[in-house]
Amino acid sequence: MSLSAGPVVIGGSTGFMGQYLIPRLQSAGRKVITVSRSGADISWRDQAAIDRAVDGASLVIGLAGKSVNCRYTPENRAAIFRSRLDTTSSLSSAIAKAANPPPLWVNSSTATIYRHAEERPMTESSGEIGTGFSVEVAKAWERALFADDLPRTRRVALRSAIVLGHGGVLGPLKNLARLGLGGAQHDGRWPISRARRAAGTGHRPGARRGRQRFSWVHVEDLARIIDFLEVTPTLDGPVNAASPNPTDNADFMATVRRLLEVRIGPPMPRWMLELGAIGIRTETELILKSRWVIPEKLTLAGFEFAYPHLEDALRESFDLERASASSTCPRPRSTTRRPRLAGASRSPDAAATPRSHDRDPRSAAPCCERRPAGPGVARVGGSRGAQPAASGAAADPPPSTPCRSRTTADRRSAAGGSR
C-alpha cells in the first residue's frame, strides 16, 4: 500500500510538531490545511470551515493543546483540559458529518498516561495506567478521540514520549548544560500541600540519583511513524511513539554534556529543582517522573527507526558532525529526493545506496547514522541487560567505516504547545 497524496488537515499547526510536519508534507506534494487559534488557514472558531476541510481529506492530524510546561494552577489546569477536549471534539464532529470522511485520524496523546515505572517498561498491551493530574488529562484526551461512532475512519492515539529535535525541550537543556547546570536531576523528599495532593499535581518521591527512566523519540521518527500509520491499516487505538532504546535521566544528561563538550555538571537535588521550577513557572514532574515506554505495536508491525539511539538523535538535534566527517565524507548530492515511505522494504542493492532515513527530508544531504552493534536497526528489551544501547553511548564507527555528512537543517523554533 502506497502513501496517499491526498489533502492533510493539521489541527494545532503552530506548535513544534506542526511546524515540522507542514513543510515535510508539502515537499512530498501534499496539500496541507492548517487549523489553529491564529496564524493558520482556519480558526478553531470556524466550525463550518473545519467541516469543509475535513470532508475529502485523506488524513487528519490532531496536535492541539496548551503546553503542560507551566505551573498547574487551577486556571492552567482548566486550560490544559479545555484546549485538548474542545479541539478534539471539533475534529470528531467534522469527521462525523463528512460525506467523504478521512480514512485515518491520528491524534496526539502522551506516554505520561502510564504510571511511574522503574522496574519494567510499559507497552500498549501490558502497560499500567497511572494516576494524577497529567494522567487524567491523557485519559480524557483519548476518550474524546474515541467518543463518537466513526465507522469509516481509523483512529490512532499517538502516545508520544519526549520529542527531540531542533528547539523543543533541548533548547533550554542545552543552555543549562553550557552554564554548568546540566547534571542529573535527583529526586527526593519535598513537602506537598493538601491542595496539590487533592489536585494530583504533587510529585511523590520516586527514582533516586537520576535513575528515572527517560523515553524519547526524534521528531523525524515521529513524522515517519505517521507515514507508517497511513499505510499500515492494522494499526489503530493507542500506539506508543518512543525509541526502542530508552535511557535514564543520568545517562541522558551525561550524553548531552559530552556532546556539548561541557565537563562540569553537578547533580541537581530535588529542593533545587523545585525552587527553580517555581521560578520559571513549570513543574518538576516533567523531569522526575520515570517514563519507561517501549513501541511494541510499531516494532511488531515492522517499523524501523531512523534514530533508534540517543547519541545520534542528539547529534542531529544539536547540528553536530562526527570528528572524522570532514576527512571521510563525500560531498553531498545537490539534488533533492522525495522521502521514501517510512518502514518500506529496501531493494537488494540497498546496501550500496543511502537509505531513505539516512537523509534529512528537509535537505539533499544524507545524515550520519550510527550502526547498531547487533543485527537489525533497533532492539527492544525489557531490562537494561537487553538494551545495550539504552545509554546512547555506543562506540563511534571504526575509522574504516565511511561516515556521511549532513547539512544543517533549517531550525525549528520551539512552541511549547499549539492551540
Image (spheres, rainbow, N blue to C red):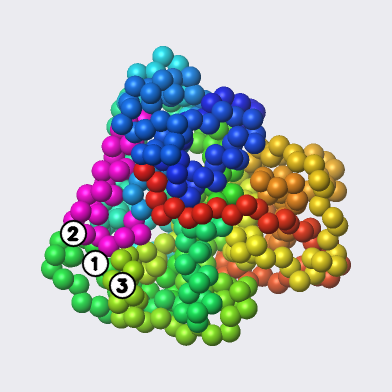
Where disc 3 sits, the SS reads: helix
Residue type, mark 1 in image: Gly
- Residue 309 located left or right of residue 333: left
Residue type, mark 3 in image: Gly
Where disc 1 sits, the SS reads: loop
Query: Residue 279 shows which numbered tag?
Result: 3
- Check contact, mark 1 vs mark 3: CB within 8 A: no
- Check contact, mark 3 vs mark 2: CB within 8 A: no
Point out the image quarter for the C terminus: top left
Residue type, mark 2 in image: Ala
- Check contact, mark 2 vs mark 1: CB within 8 A: yes
| Crowd rating for badge 2 (residues with CA inside 10 Å; few <14, some 14–19, many 20+) | some
Image quarter of residue 98? top left
Q: Position of residue 351 (x, y in %)?
A: 82, 49
Label 1 sits on residue:
202
Please tell me which residue lies in front, 233 or 86: 86
